[in-house]
Amino acid sequence: MNILVINAGSSSLKYQLYDMSTEQVLAKGRVERIGMDSSILTHEVEQQPEVREVSEILDHTTAIRKVLDMLTHAKFGVLSNIQDIQAIGHRVVHGGESFSESVLVDQAVKLEIRKLFDLAPLHNPAHMMGITAVETNLPEVPQAVVFDTAFHQTMPASSYLYAIPTVLYKKHQIRRYGFHGTSHDYVSKRAAEFLGKPLESLKLVTCHIGNGASCTAILNGRSYDTSMGMTPLEGLMMGTRSGDLDPAVVPFTLNKEDLTLNEVNSMLNKHSGLLAVSGISSDMREVVEAMKAGHENAKLAFEMYAYRIRKYIGAYIAAMDGVDAIIFTAGVGENSDVLRKEICRHLTFFGVTLDEERNAVRSSEPRTITTDDSAVSVLVVPTNEELLIARDTYRLVRNKLAGDSSEL
Ligand code: AMP
């Protein structure tokens, strides 16, 4: 079965085509600048030169059509015809309390996703455009949705409730949802395989440190607490997001500066974090380079960033009353040995002994970066959210096909 995984944003769309018999990626790519002039489609097939096509792509329906044309292109394509795509899996950021697992798309599911637009105004409407665009282009092909929040639906109320009047939770579902669930889920499973232990017996702290960043306490295979909240703004310091701060900062800033609520919201989401503190960049590579060159604010930004991660790791070890392994993943977590070192050098109290040589190794495979006698293992596990989306879609579609044939 071939499955096309789609991650639709408001003006972009990423795709990966999987052959599920081998779990190999046949092709991948992205469409950028949808709705603008000079939209760009970039298409990659292993061991072939990247293809870049500039054209006018005014909406997601056209974007999907262009992707399908490319996948079946005589020269650059990997499929002989469109019927060779048997299912589609979409990433959807917010599943609220309605979805604790991935589901096949039907009218009721679409209605629920629409109801959640308020909670994820930047993401869910764009995902919905992706789903509708597929329906238009491939009306017969089953679609599944995989939610970033679903994995965290196992959190106990003591983790997910905010200490504010309960009526706000009851009326508006204001609570912690958590994000990056697909990644935390994927790397925790990979880590258990790598350690050769059942996931159900492990206490893990997973650190997804990319442009957005979150830590999760995973107790016996289930999310027990996570650092992102009702929105992806809470928790760790990120590339451009502030992470945790005293909520009183918002009204105070509104009073002192001539800003609107929207402007403060935008400041906290787009102009804070590494970018604001370093004054240089939201990209950890540039911040580290500047720090090494003696830039004081870059050093401060780096230290704050690492310190916040360490605080969450410590908190989650206390929350679970122990830890077997700490896992780093995503762009920064997988690639920045400097950051991992800065975090781990203060975890000796928990029995972490970093092996600097192992920490410096680069690999696309899971690996240990602690010494053999370290009481707690620290691992680097490359994430693969698309593969998990493809696997969930495959399982759901196969189950449906099995159900349909048994009804005959
Ligand atoms: P992600 O959101 O997981 O795609 O991660 C993207 C981020 O990874 C970028 O913004 C970079 O800051 C970061 N990144 C990628 N490579 C490195 C590296 N070698 N060292 C530090 N950060 C990196």
Image (cartoon, rainbow, N blue to C red):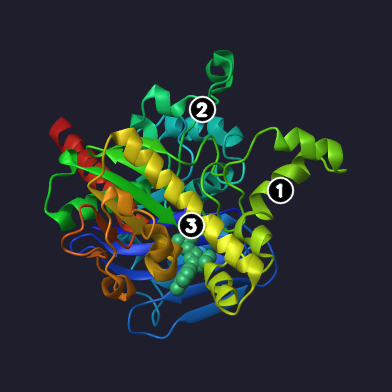
Percent x, y of residue 142: 34, 46
Q: Specify the label residue 175 is tagged with.
A: 2
Can you tell which quarter of the image residue 357 is in? Answer: bottom left
Q: CA distance from mark 2 to mark 1?
A: 21 Å
Residues marked 2 and 1 touching at CB (< 8 Å):
no
User: In front: mark 3 or mark 2?
Assistant: 3
SS for tag 3?
Answer: helix
Question: Farthest residue toward the right?
Answer: 258
In the picture of the structure, the residue carrying the numbered disc 3 is 306
SS for tag 2?
Answer: loop
SS for tag 1?
Answer: helix
Q: Choose between 10 and 3: the one closer to the eye.
A: 10
Task: Please give the name of the residue rendered at 20% of the width and 53% of the height, measured from the top-left corner.
Answer: 375
Q: Choose between 348 and 295: the one closer to the eye.
A: 348
Q: CA distance from mark 3 to mark 1?
A: 24 Å
In the picture of the structure, the residue carrying the numbered disc 1 is 266
Q: Choose between 370 and 22: the one closer to the eye.
A: 370
Left/right of residue 195 with respect to residue 381 in the rendered view: left
Percent x, y of residue 138: 42, 53
Mark 1 vs ligand 1: CB below 8 Å:
no
Which kind of residue does numbered mark 1 sit on? Ser
